[in-house]
């Protein structure tokens, strides 16, 4: 039997549901203790029920929340994994609990076979045996666990986080662990494509629909058939394109520019942004109905400074990747370099770390990467040269980048953070503006903090 000799705890106040679950679990060979309230469950857990193989817990209970039961159990030694049963309105709470280490969740109503399979998988995964993919910090281990759970569904996911934290890496992880993994992964940076071309790139166009359109063009939505369409920087879409994307989500159909044929969208949609879309809704820059469509499941990727355990782990991984691509590379990171990595606050997040490791691998003269290889543009302790008066001298490139960065920030401040008007002030294209912002690690909201 599926759960033979397993001991389970059930927290469920509905007598019909509770009795049904107990009967089925016992048929599968499990021994079940049923608690009908938060209080009863917490008392049992405090009395030693944490020795159970798993706890199955409803979110909404008459005297509190299933979260209270989970937090109480987490205070004990070797707490059991939790499977939460939740209504659609409580999905975000369940997702948050999984990131905290809960285990898994099911949305009511659920299939009994799926329910039993999830419990079996949960018990079998009590000891982590696979190597981490996203990071070794508690935050990233929890995030990886969450992504593994939601990868099995077809729900739209909104991934948020600062520039450079690895939102696309998380999207690719979702794709690779989903039923769409054999299909294509189509990544689109909505901020990097000029507004006048973006609609054609997203939805395609018919021959003659645009100036120079000599043939039919298949857009990203059509090319994502059987796979995943990942829209990065979704907050940069114009309101007009937001309405077209909303139609694609609601009807699962779209039409090419200049065409009348209705085409089925047969991919999974993942979106990402570094902006606060709720604030964008308040200012009229983002549609509220679209926000709720793309934000079925919310996933936030923490900045690198909030998970210092990942810095050296990522650096070593990048060193290995670079070494596999090149014949001559440093042996590894010196102890001084490791210390310098840990002290840096990483304003550019994982992208900055990757760039610094790659540059250091090229610049290092000896077998080990030194602090000066990683941070040639910073203080003397990190490798900059001291002038005769004791002042640290960075490179000319670093000085030029700093001046350019400050000028761009002033332009963004004058336009309230709007990229296109700021690009016009600087006499450059929107695409060039975006590339400079990306290279210099400038976020749209950063103008508010500029001096």
Image (cartoon, rainbow, N blue to C red):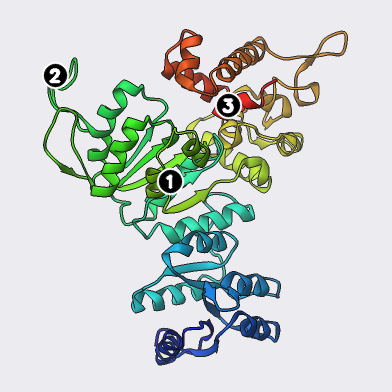
Asked if residue 163 is positioned above or below residue 84 in the image, the reply reads: above
Asked if residue 375 is positioned above or below residue 229 in the image, the reply reads: above
Asked if residue 328 is positioned above or below residue 246 in the image, the reply reads: above
The residue under label 1 is 171
Of pointers 2 and 3, the one earlier in the residue sequence: 2
**Dots 3, 1 in contact, CB < 8 A:** no
Percent of width and height locating residue 47: 70, 86
Asked if residue 137 is positioned above or below residue 384 in the image, the reply reads: below
Quarter placement of the C terminus: top right
Quarter placement of the N terminus: bottom left
Q: Name the side, left or right, on which 198 lies relative to 20.
A: left
- The image quadrant that residue 172 belongs to is top left
Of pointers 3 and 1, the one earlier in the residue sequence: 1
Tell me how far mark 2 sits from mark 1, CA to CA: 34 Å
SS at mark 1?
Answer: helix
Name the residue at the right extreme: 389
The residue under label 2 is 214
Percent of width and height locating residue 9: 55, 84
SS at mark 3?
Answer: loop
């Amino acid at each position: 039997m599926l759960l033979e000799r397993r001991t389970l705890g059930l927290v469920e106040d509905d007598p019909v549901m509770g009795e049904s679950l107990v009967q089925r679990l016992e048929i599968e060979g499990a021994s079940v203790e049923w608690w009908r309230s938060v209080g009863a469950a917490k008392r049992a857990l405090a009395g030693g029920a944490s020795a159970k193989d798993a706890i199955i817990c409803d979110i909404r209970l008459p005297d509190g929340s299933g979260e209270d039961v989970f937090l109480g159990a987490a205070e004990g030694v070797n707490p059991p994994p939790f499977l939460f049963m939740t209504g659609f309105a409580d999905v975000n709470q369940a997702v948050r609990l999984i990131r905290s280490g809960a285990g898994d969740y099911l949305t009511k109503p659920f299939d009994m076979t799926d329910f039993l399979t999830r419990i079996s998988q949960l018990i079998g995964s009590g000891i982590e045996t696979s190597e981490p993919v996203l990071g070794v910090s508690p935050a990233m281990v929890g995030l990886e666990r969450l992504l593994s759970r939601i990868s099995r569904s077809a729900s739209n996911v909104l991934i948020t986080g600062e520039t450079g934290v690895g939102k696309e890496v998380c999207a690719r992880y979702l794709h690779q662990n989903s039923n769409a993994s054999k299909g294509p992964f189509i990544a689109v940076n909505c901020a990097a494509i000029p507004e006048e071309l973006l609609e054609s790139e997203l939805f395609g166009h018919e021959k003659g629909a645009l100036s120079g359109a000599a043939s039919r063009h298949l857009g990203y939505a059509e090319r994502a058939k059987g796979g995943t369409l990942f829209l990065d920087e979704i907050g940069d879409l114009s309101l007009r394109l937001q309405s077209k994307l909303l139609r694609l989500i609601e009807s699962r159909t779209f039409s090419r520019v200049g065409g009348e044929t209705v085409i089925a969208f047969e991919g999974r949609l993942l979106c990402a942004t570094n902006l606060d879309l709720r604030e964008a809704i308040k200012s009229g820059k983002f549609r509220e109905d679209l926000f709720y469509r793309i934000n079925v499941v919310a996933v936030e990727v923490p900045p690198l400074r909030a998970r210092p355990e990942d810095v050296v782990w990522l650096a070593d991984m990048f060193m290995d990747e670079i070494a596999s691509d090149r014949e001559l590379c440093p042996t590894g990171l010196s102890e001084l370099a490791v210390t310098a990595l840990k002290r840096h606050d990483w304003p550019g997040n994982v992208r900055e770390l990757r760039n610094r490791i790659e540059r250091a691998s090229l610049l290092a003269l000896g077998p080990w990467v030194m602090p000066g290889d990683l941070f040639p543009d910073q203080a003397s302790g990190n490798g900059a040269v001291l002038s005769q008066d004791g002042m640290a001298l960075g490179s000319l490139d670093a000085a030029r980048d700093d001046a350019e960065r400050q000028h761009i920030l002033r332009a963004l401040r004058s336009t309230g953070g709007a990229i296109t008007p700021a690009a016009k002030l600087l006499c450059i294209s929107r695409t060039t503006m975006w590339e400079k912002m990306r290279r210099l690690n400038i976020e749209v909201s950063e103008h508010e903090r500029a001096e």
